[in-house]
Amino acid sequence: MTVHVTIALDEAVKAKLDALADARQALIDDIVAMAVLDMAVEEEAAPFVSADEEAAFAAAVEQGLKSLAEGRVHSHEEVVAALAVQRAARGG
C-alpha cells in the first residue's frame, strides 16, 4: 500500500532536493522516501556514519565522474593486468 503525503518546502530546501536528485539521478519522490525511511528505521538505513563521510563519498564520486568526462579511464583488461603485476610482486 502506498500513502501519498503533501509537504511544504521553502525554495532553498527544494533547490537542495533538486540538486540531490540530479546528482543521484533519482526522482525527488524517491529521495524523500529514502530520507523518511532513514528517519523511521535509523539503525538499519544509515549507510554513512557521519555527514563528513557522506560528503567524502559524494566528492569521490564527483571526481570519478570528472575523470570519466575528461577521458582519464582504464580498460578492464588494463586494471586486471595491473592487479596481476601487484599480486605477483607480493608473491601471491
Image (cartoon, rainbow, N blue to C red):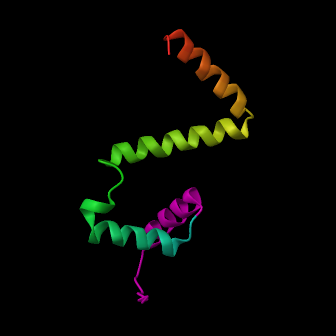
On the image, the x and y values in percent for residue 84 come to: 60, 20
Q: Residue at x 50, y 75 (%)?
A: 29
On the image, the x and y values in percent for residue 20 come to: 51, 60
On the image, the x and y values in percent for residue 31 come to: 47, 68
Q: Is residue 54 left or right of residue 67?
A: left
- The magenta-colored residue range is 1-25
Q: Residue at x 72, y 40 (%)?
A: 69
22 or 74: nearer the viewer: 74
- For the question of whether residue 74 can be seen, the reply is no
76 or 28: nearer the viewer: 76
What residue occupies the far right of the structure in this picture?
71
Q: Is residue 1 left or right of residue 25?
A: left
Q: Is residue 26 left or right of residue 39?
A: right
Quadrant into which the N terminus falls: bottom left
Q: Is residue 4 left or right of residue 84?
A: left
On the image, the x and y values in percent for residue 48 come to: 34, 49
Total tally of numbered discs in the picture: 0
3 or 52: nearer the viewer: 3
What residue occupies the far left of the structure in this picture?
43
For residue 12: magenta?
A: yes
- For the question of whether residue 51 can be seen, the reply is yes
For residue 81: magenta?
A: no
- Within the image, what quadrant is residue 87 found in? top right
Q: Residue at x 43, y 88 (%)?
A: 2
Q: Residue at x 26, y 63 (%)?
A: 42
92 or 31: nearer the viewer: 92
Q: Is residue 19 above or below residue 6?
A: above
